[in-house]
Image: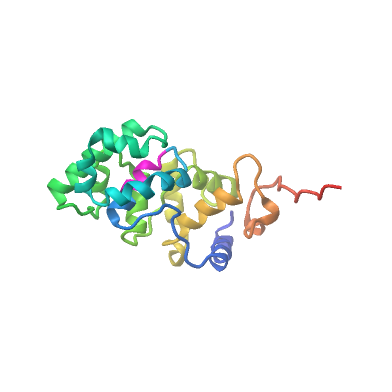
Amino acid sequence: MKKSDIPHFFAALQAANPHPQTELEYGSHFQLLAAVLLSAQATDAGVNKATRRLFQVAPTPQAMLALGLEGLEQHIKTIGLYRTKAKNLLVTCQVLIERYGGEIPRTRQELEALPGVGRKTANVVLNVAFGEPTMAVDTHIFRVANRTGLAPGKTPLEVELKLLKRVPPEYALHAHHWLILLGRYVCQARKPRCWECRVSTWCDYKPKTPAPTAAR
């Protein structure tokens, strides 16, 4: 994608959705962190279904720790890798209580030191909770960045670093949400819905998918 096309690309996404939000449901910074940790290799819809009840009974690190491992597992057993996630989440709760008074740390280094929290999770928390212009590269963003030519790369980190350089500053805060939503609902993996895409004009993907013909 030409550098001169990038502002038009993001202006179109902004016009369609001026204030994009994460689709994970949460009521506090801690609940956001927990939801993102649980969302690895799982859908936001699946996580939300489990956390609606979980956050009612355990809205804080203290309350979640009080559930114990078996209690927490019962609430999240519909989520993939729930046993490992439950163990990591409880240890994270302990660390948050002991080191941070139950609050969420605000630096990448501190976040990534928490069990189960990698770079992508830290980026989401830094962006959504603290308004930092980070790029949380998941499978959707990785696909969109490569397919459109916006920021091609062989690894999520390579794509992230390219996005940080290529996205204009005025769009940086919401860019990762726009790209996630684009990949989730339009620029889908198996069959991109090019006929619905608001940014196809600037996209490098050549075999554009035509609109389906009406059944006769």
Residue shown at 47% from the left, 66% from the top? 19
Indicate whether residue 98 is drawn in magenta: no
Residue 116 is situated, as x and y percent measured from the top left of the image, at 30, 38
Per the rendered image, the range of residues in magenta is: 34-40
Question: Toward the viewer: 5 or 16?
Answer: 16
**In this view, which residue lies farthest toward the right?**
216
Q: Is residue 189 above or below residue 27?
A: above
Magenta: main secondary structure equals helix
Say left or right for 124 vs 19. Answer: left
Q: Quadrant of residue 126?
A: bottom left
**In this view, which residue lies farthest toward the left?**
98
Q: Is residue 20 above or below residue 193?
A: below
| Residue 65 appears in view | yes
Residue 137 is situated, as x and y percent measured from the top left of the image, at 44, 46
Residue 173 is situated, as x and y percent measured from the top left of the image, at 41, 62
Residue shown at 42% from the left, 36% from the top? 78
Residue 209 is situated, as x and y percent measured from the top left of the image, at 71, 47
The quarter of the rendered structure image containing the N terminus is bottom right
Q: How is the image coloured?
A: rainbow
Question: Toward the viewer: 70 or 188?
Answer: 70
Q: Is residue 81 above or below residue 167?
A: above
Residue shown at 47% from the left, 56% from the top? 177
| Residue 166 appears in view | no
Q: Quadrant of residue 85?
A: top left
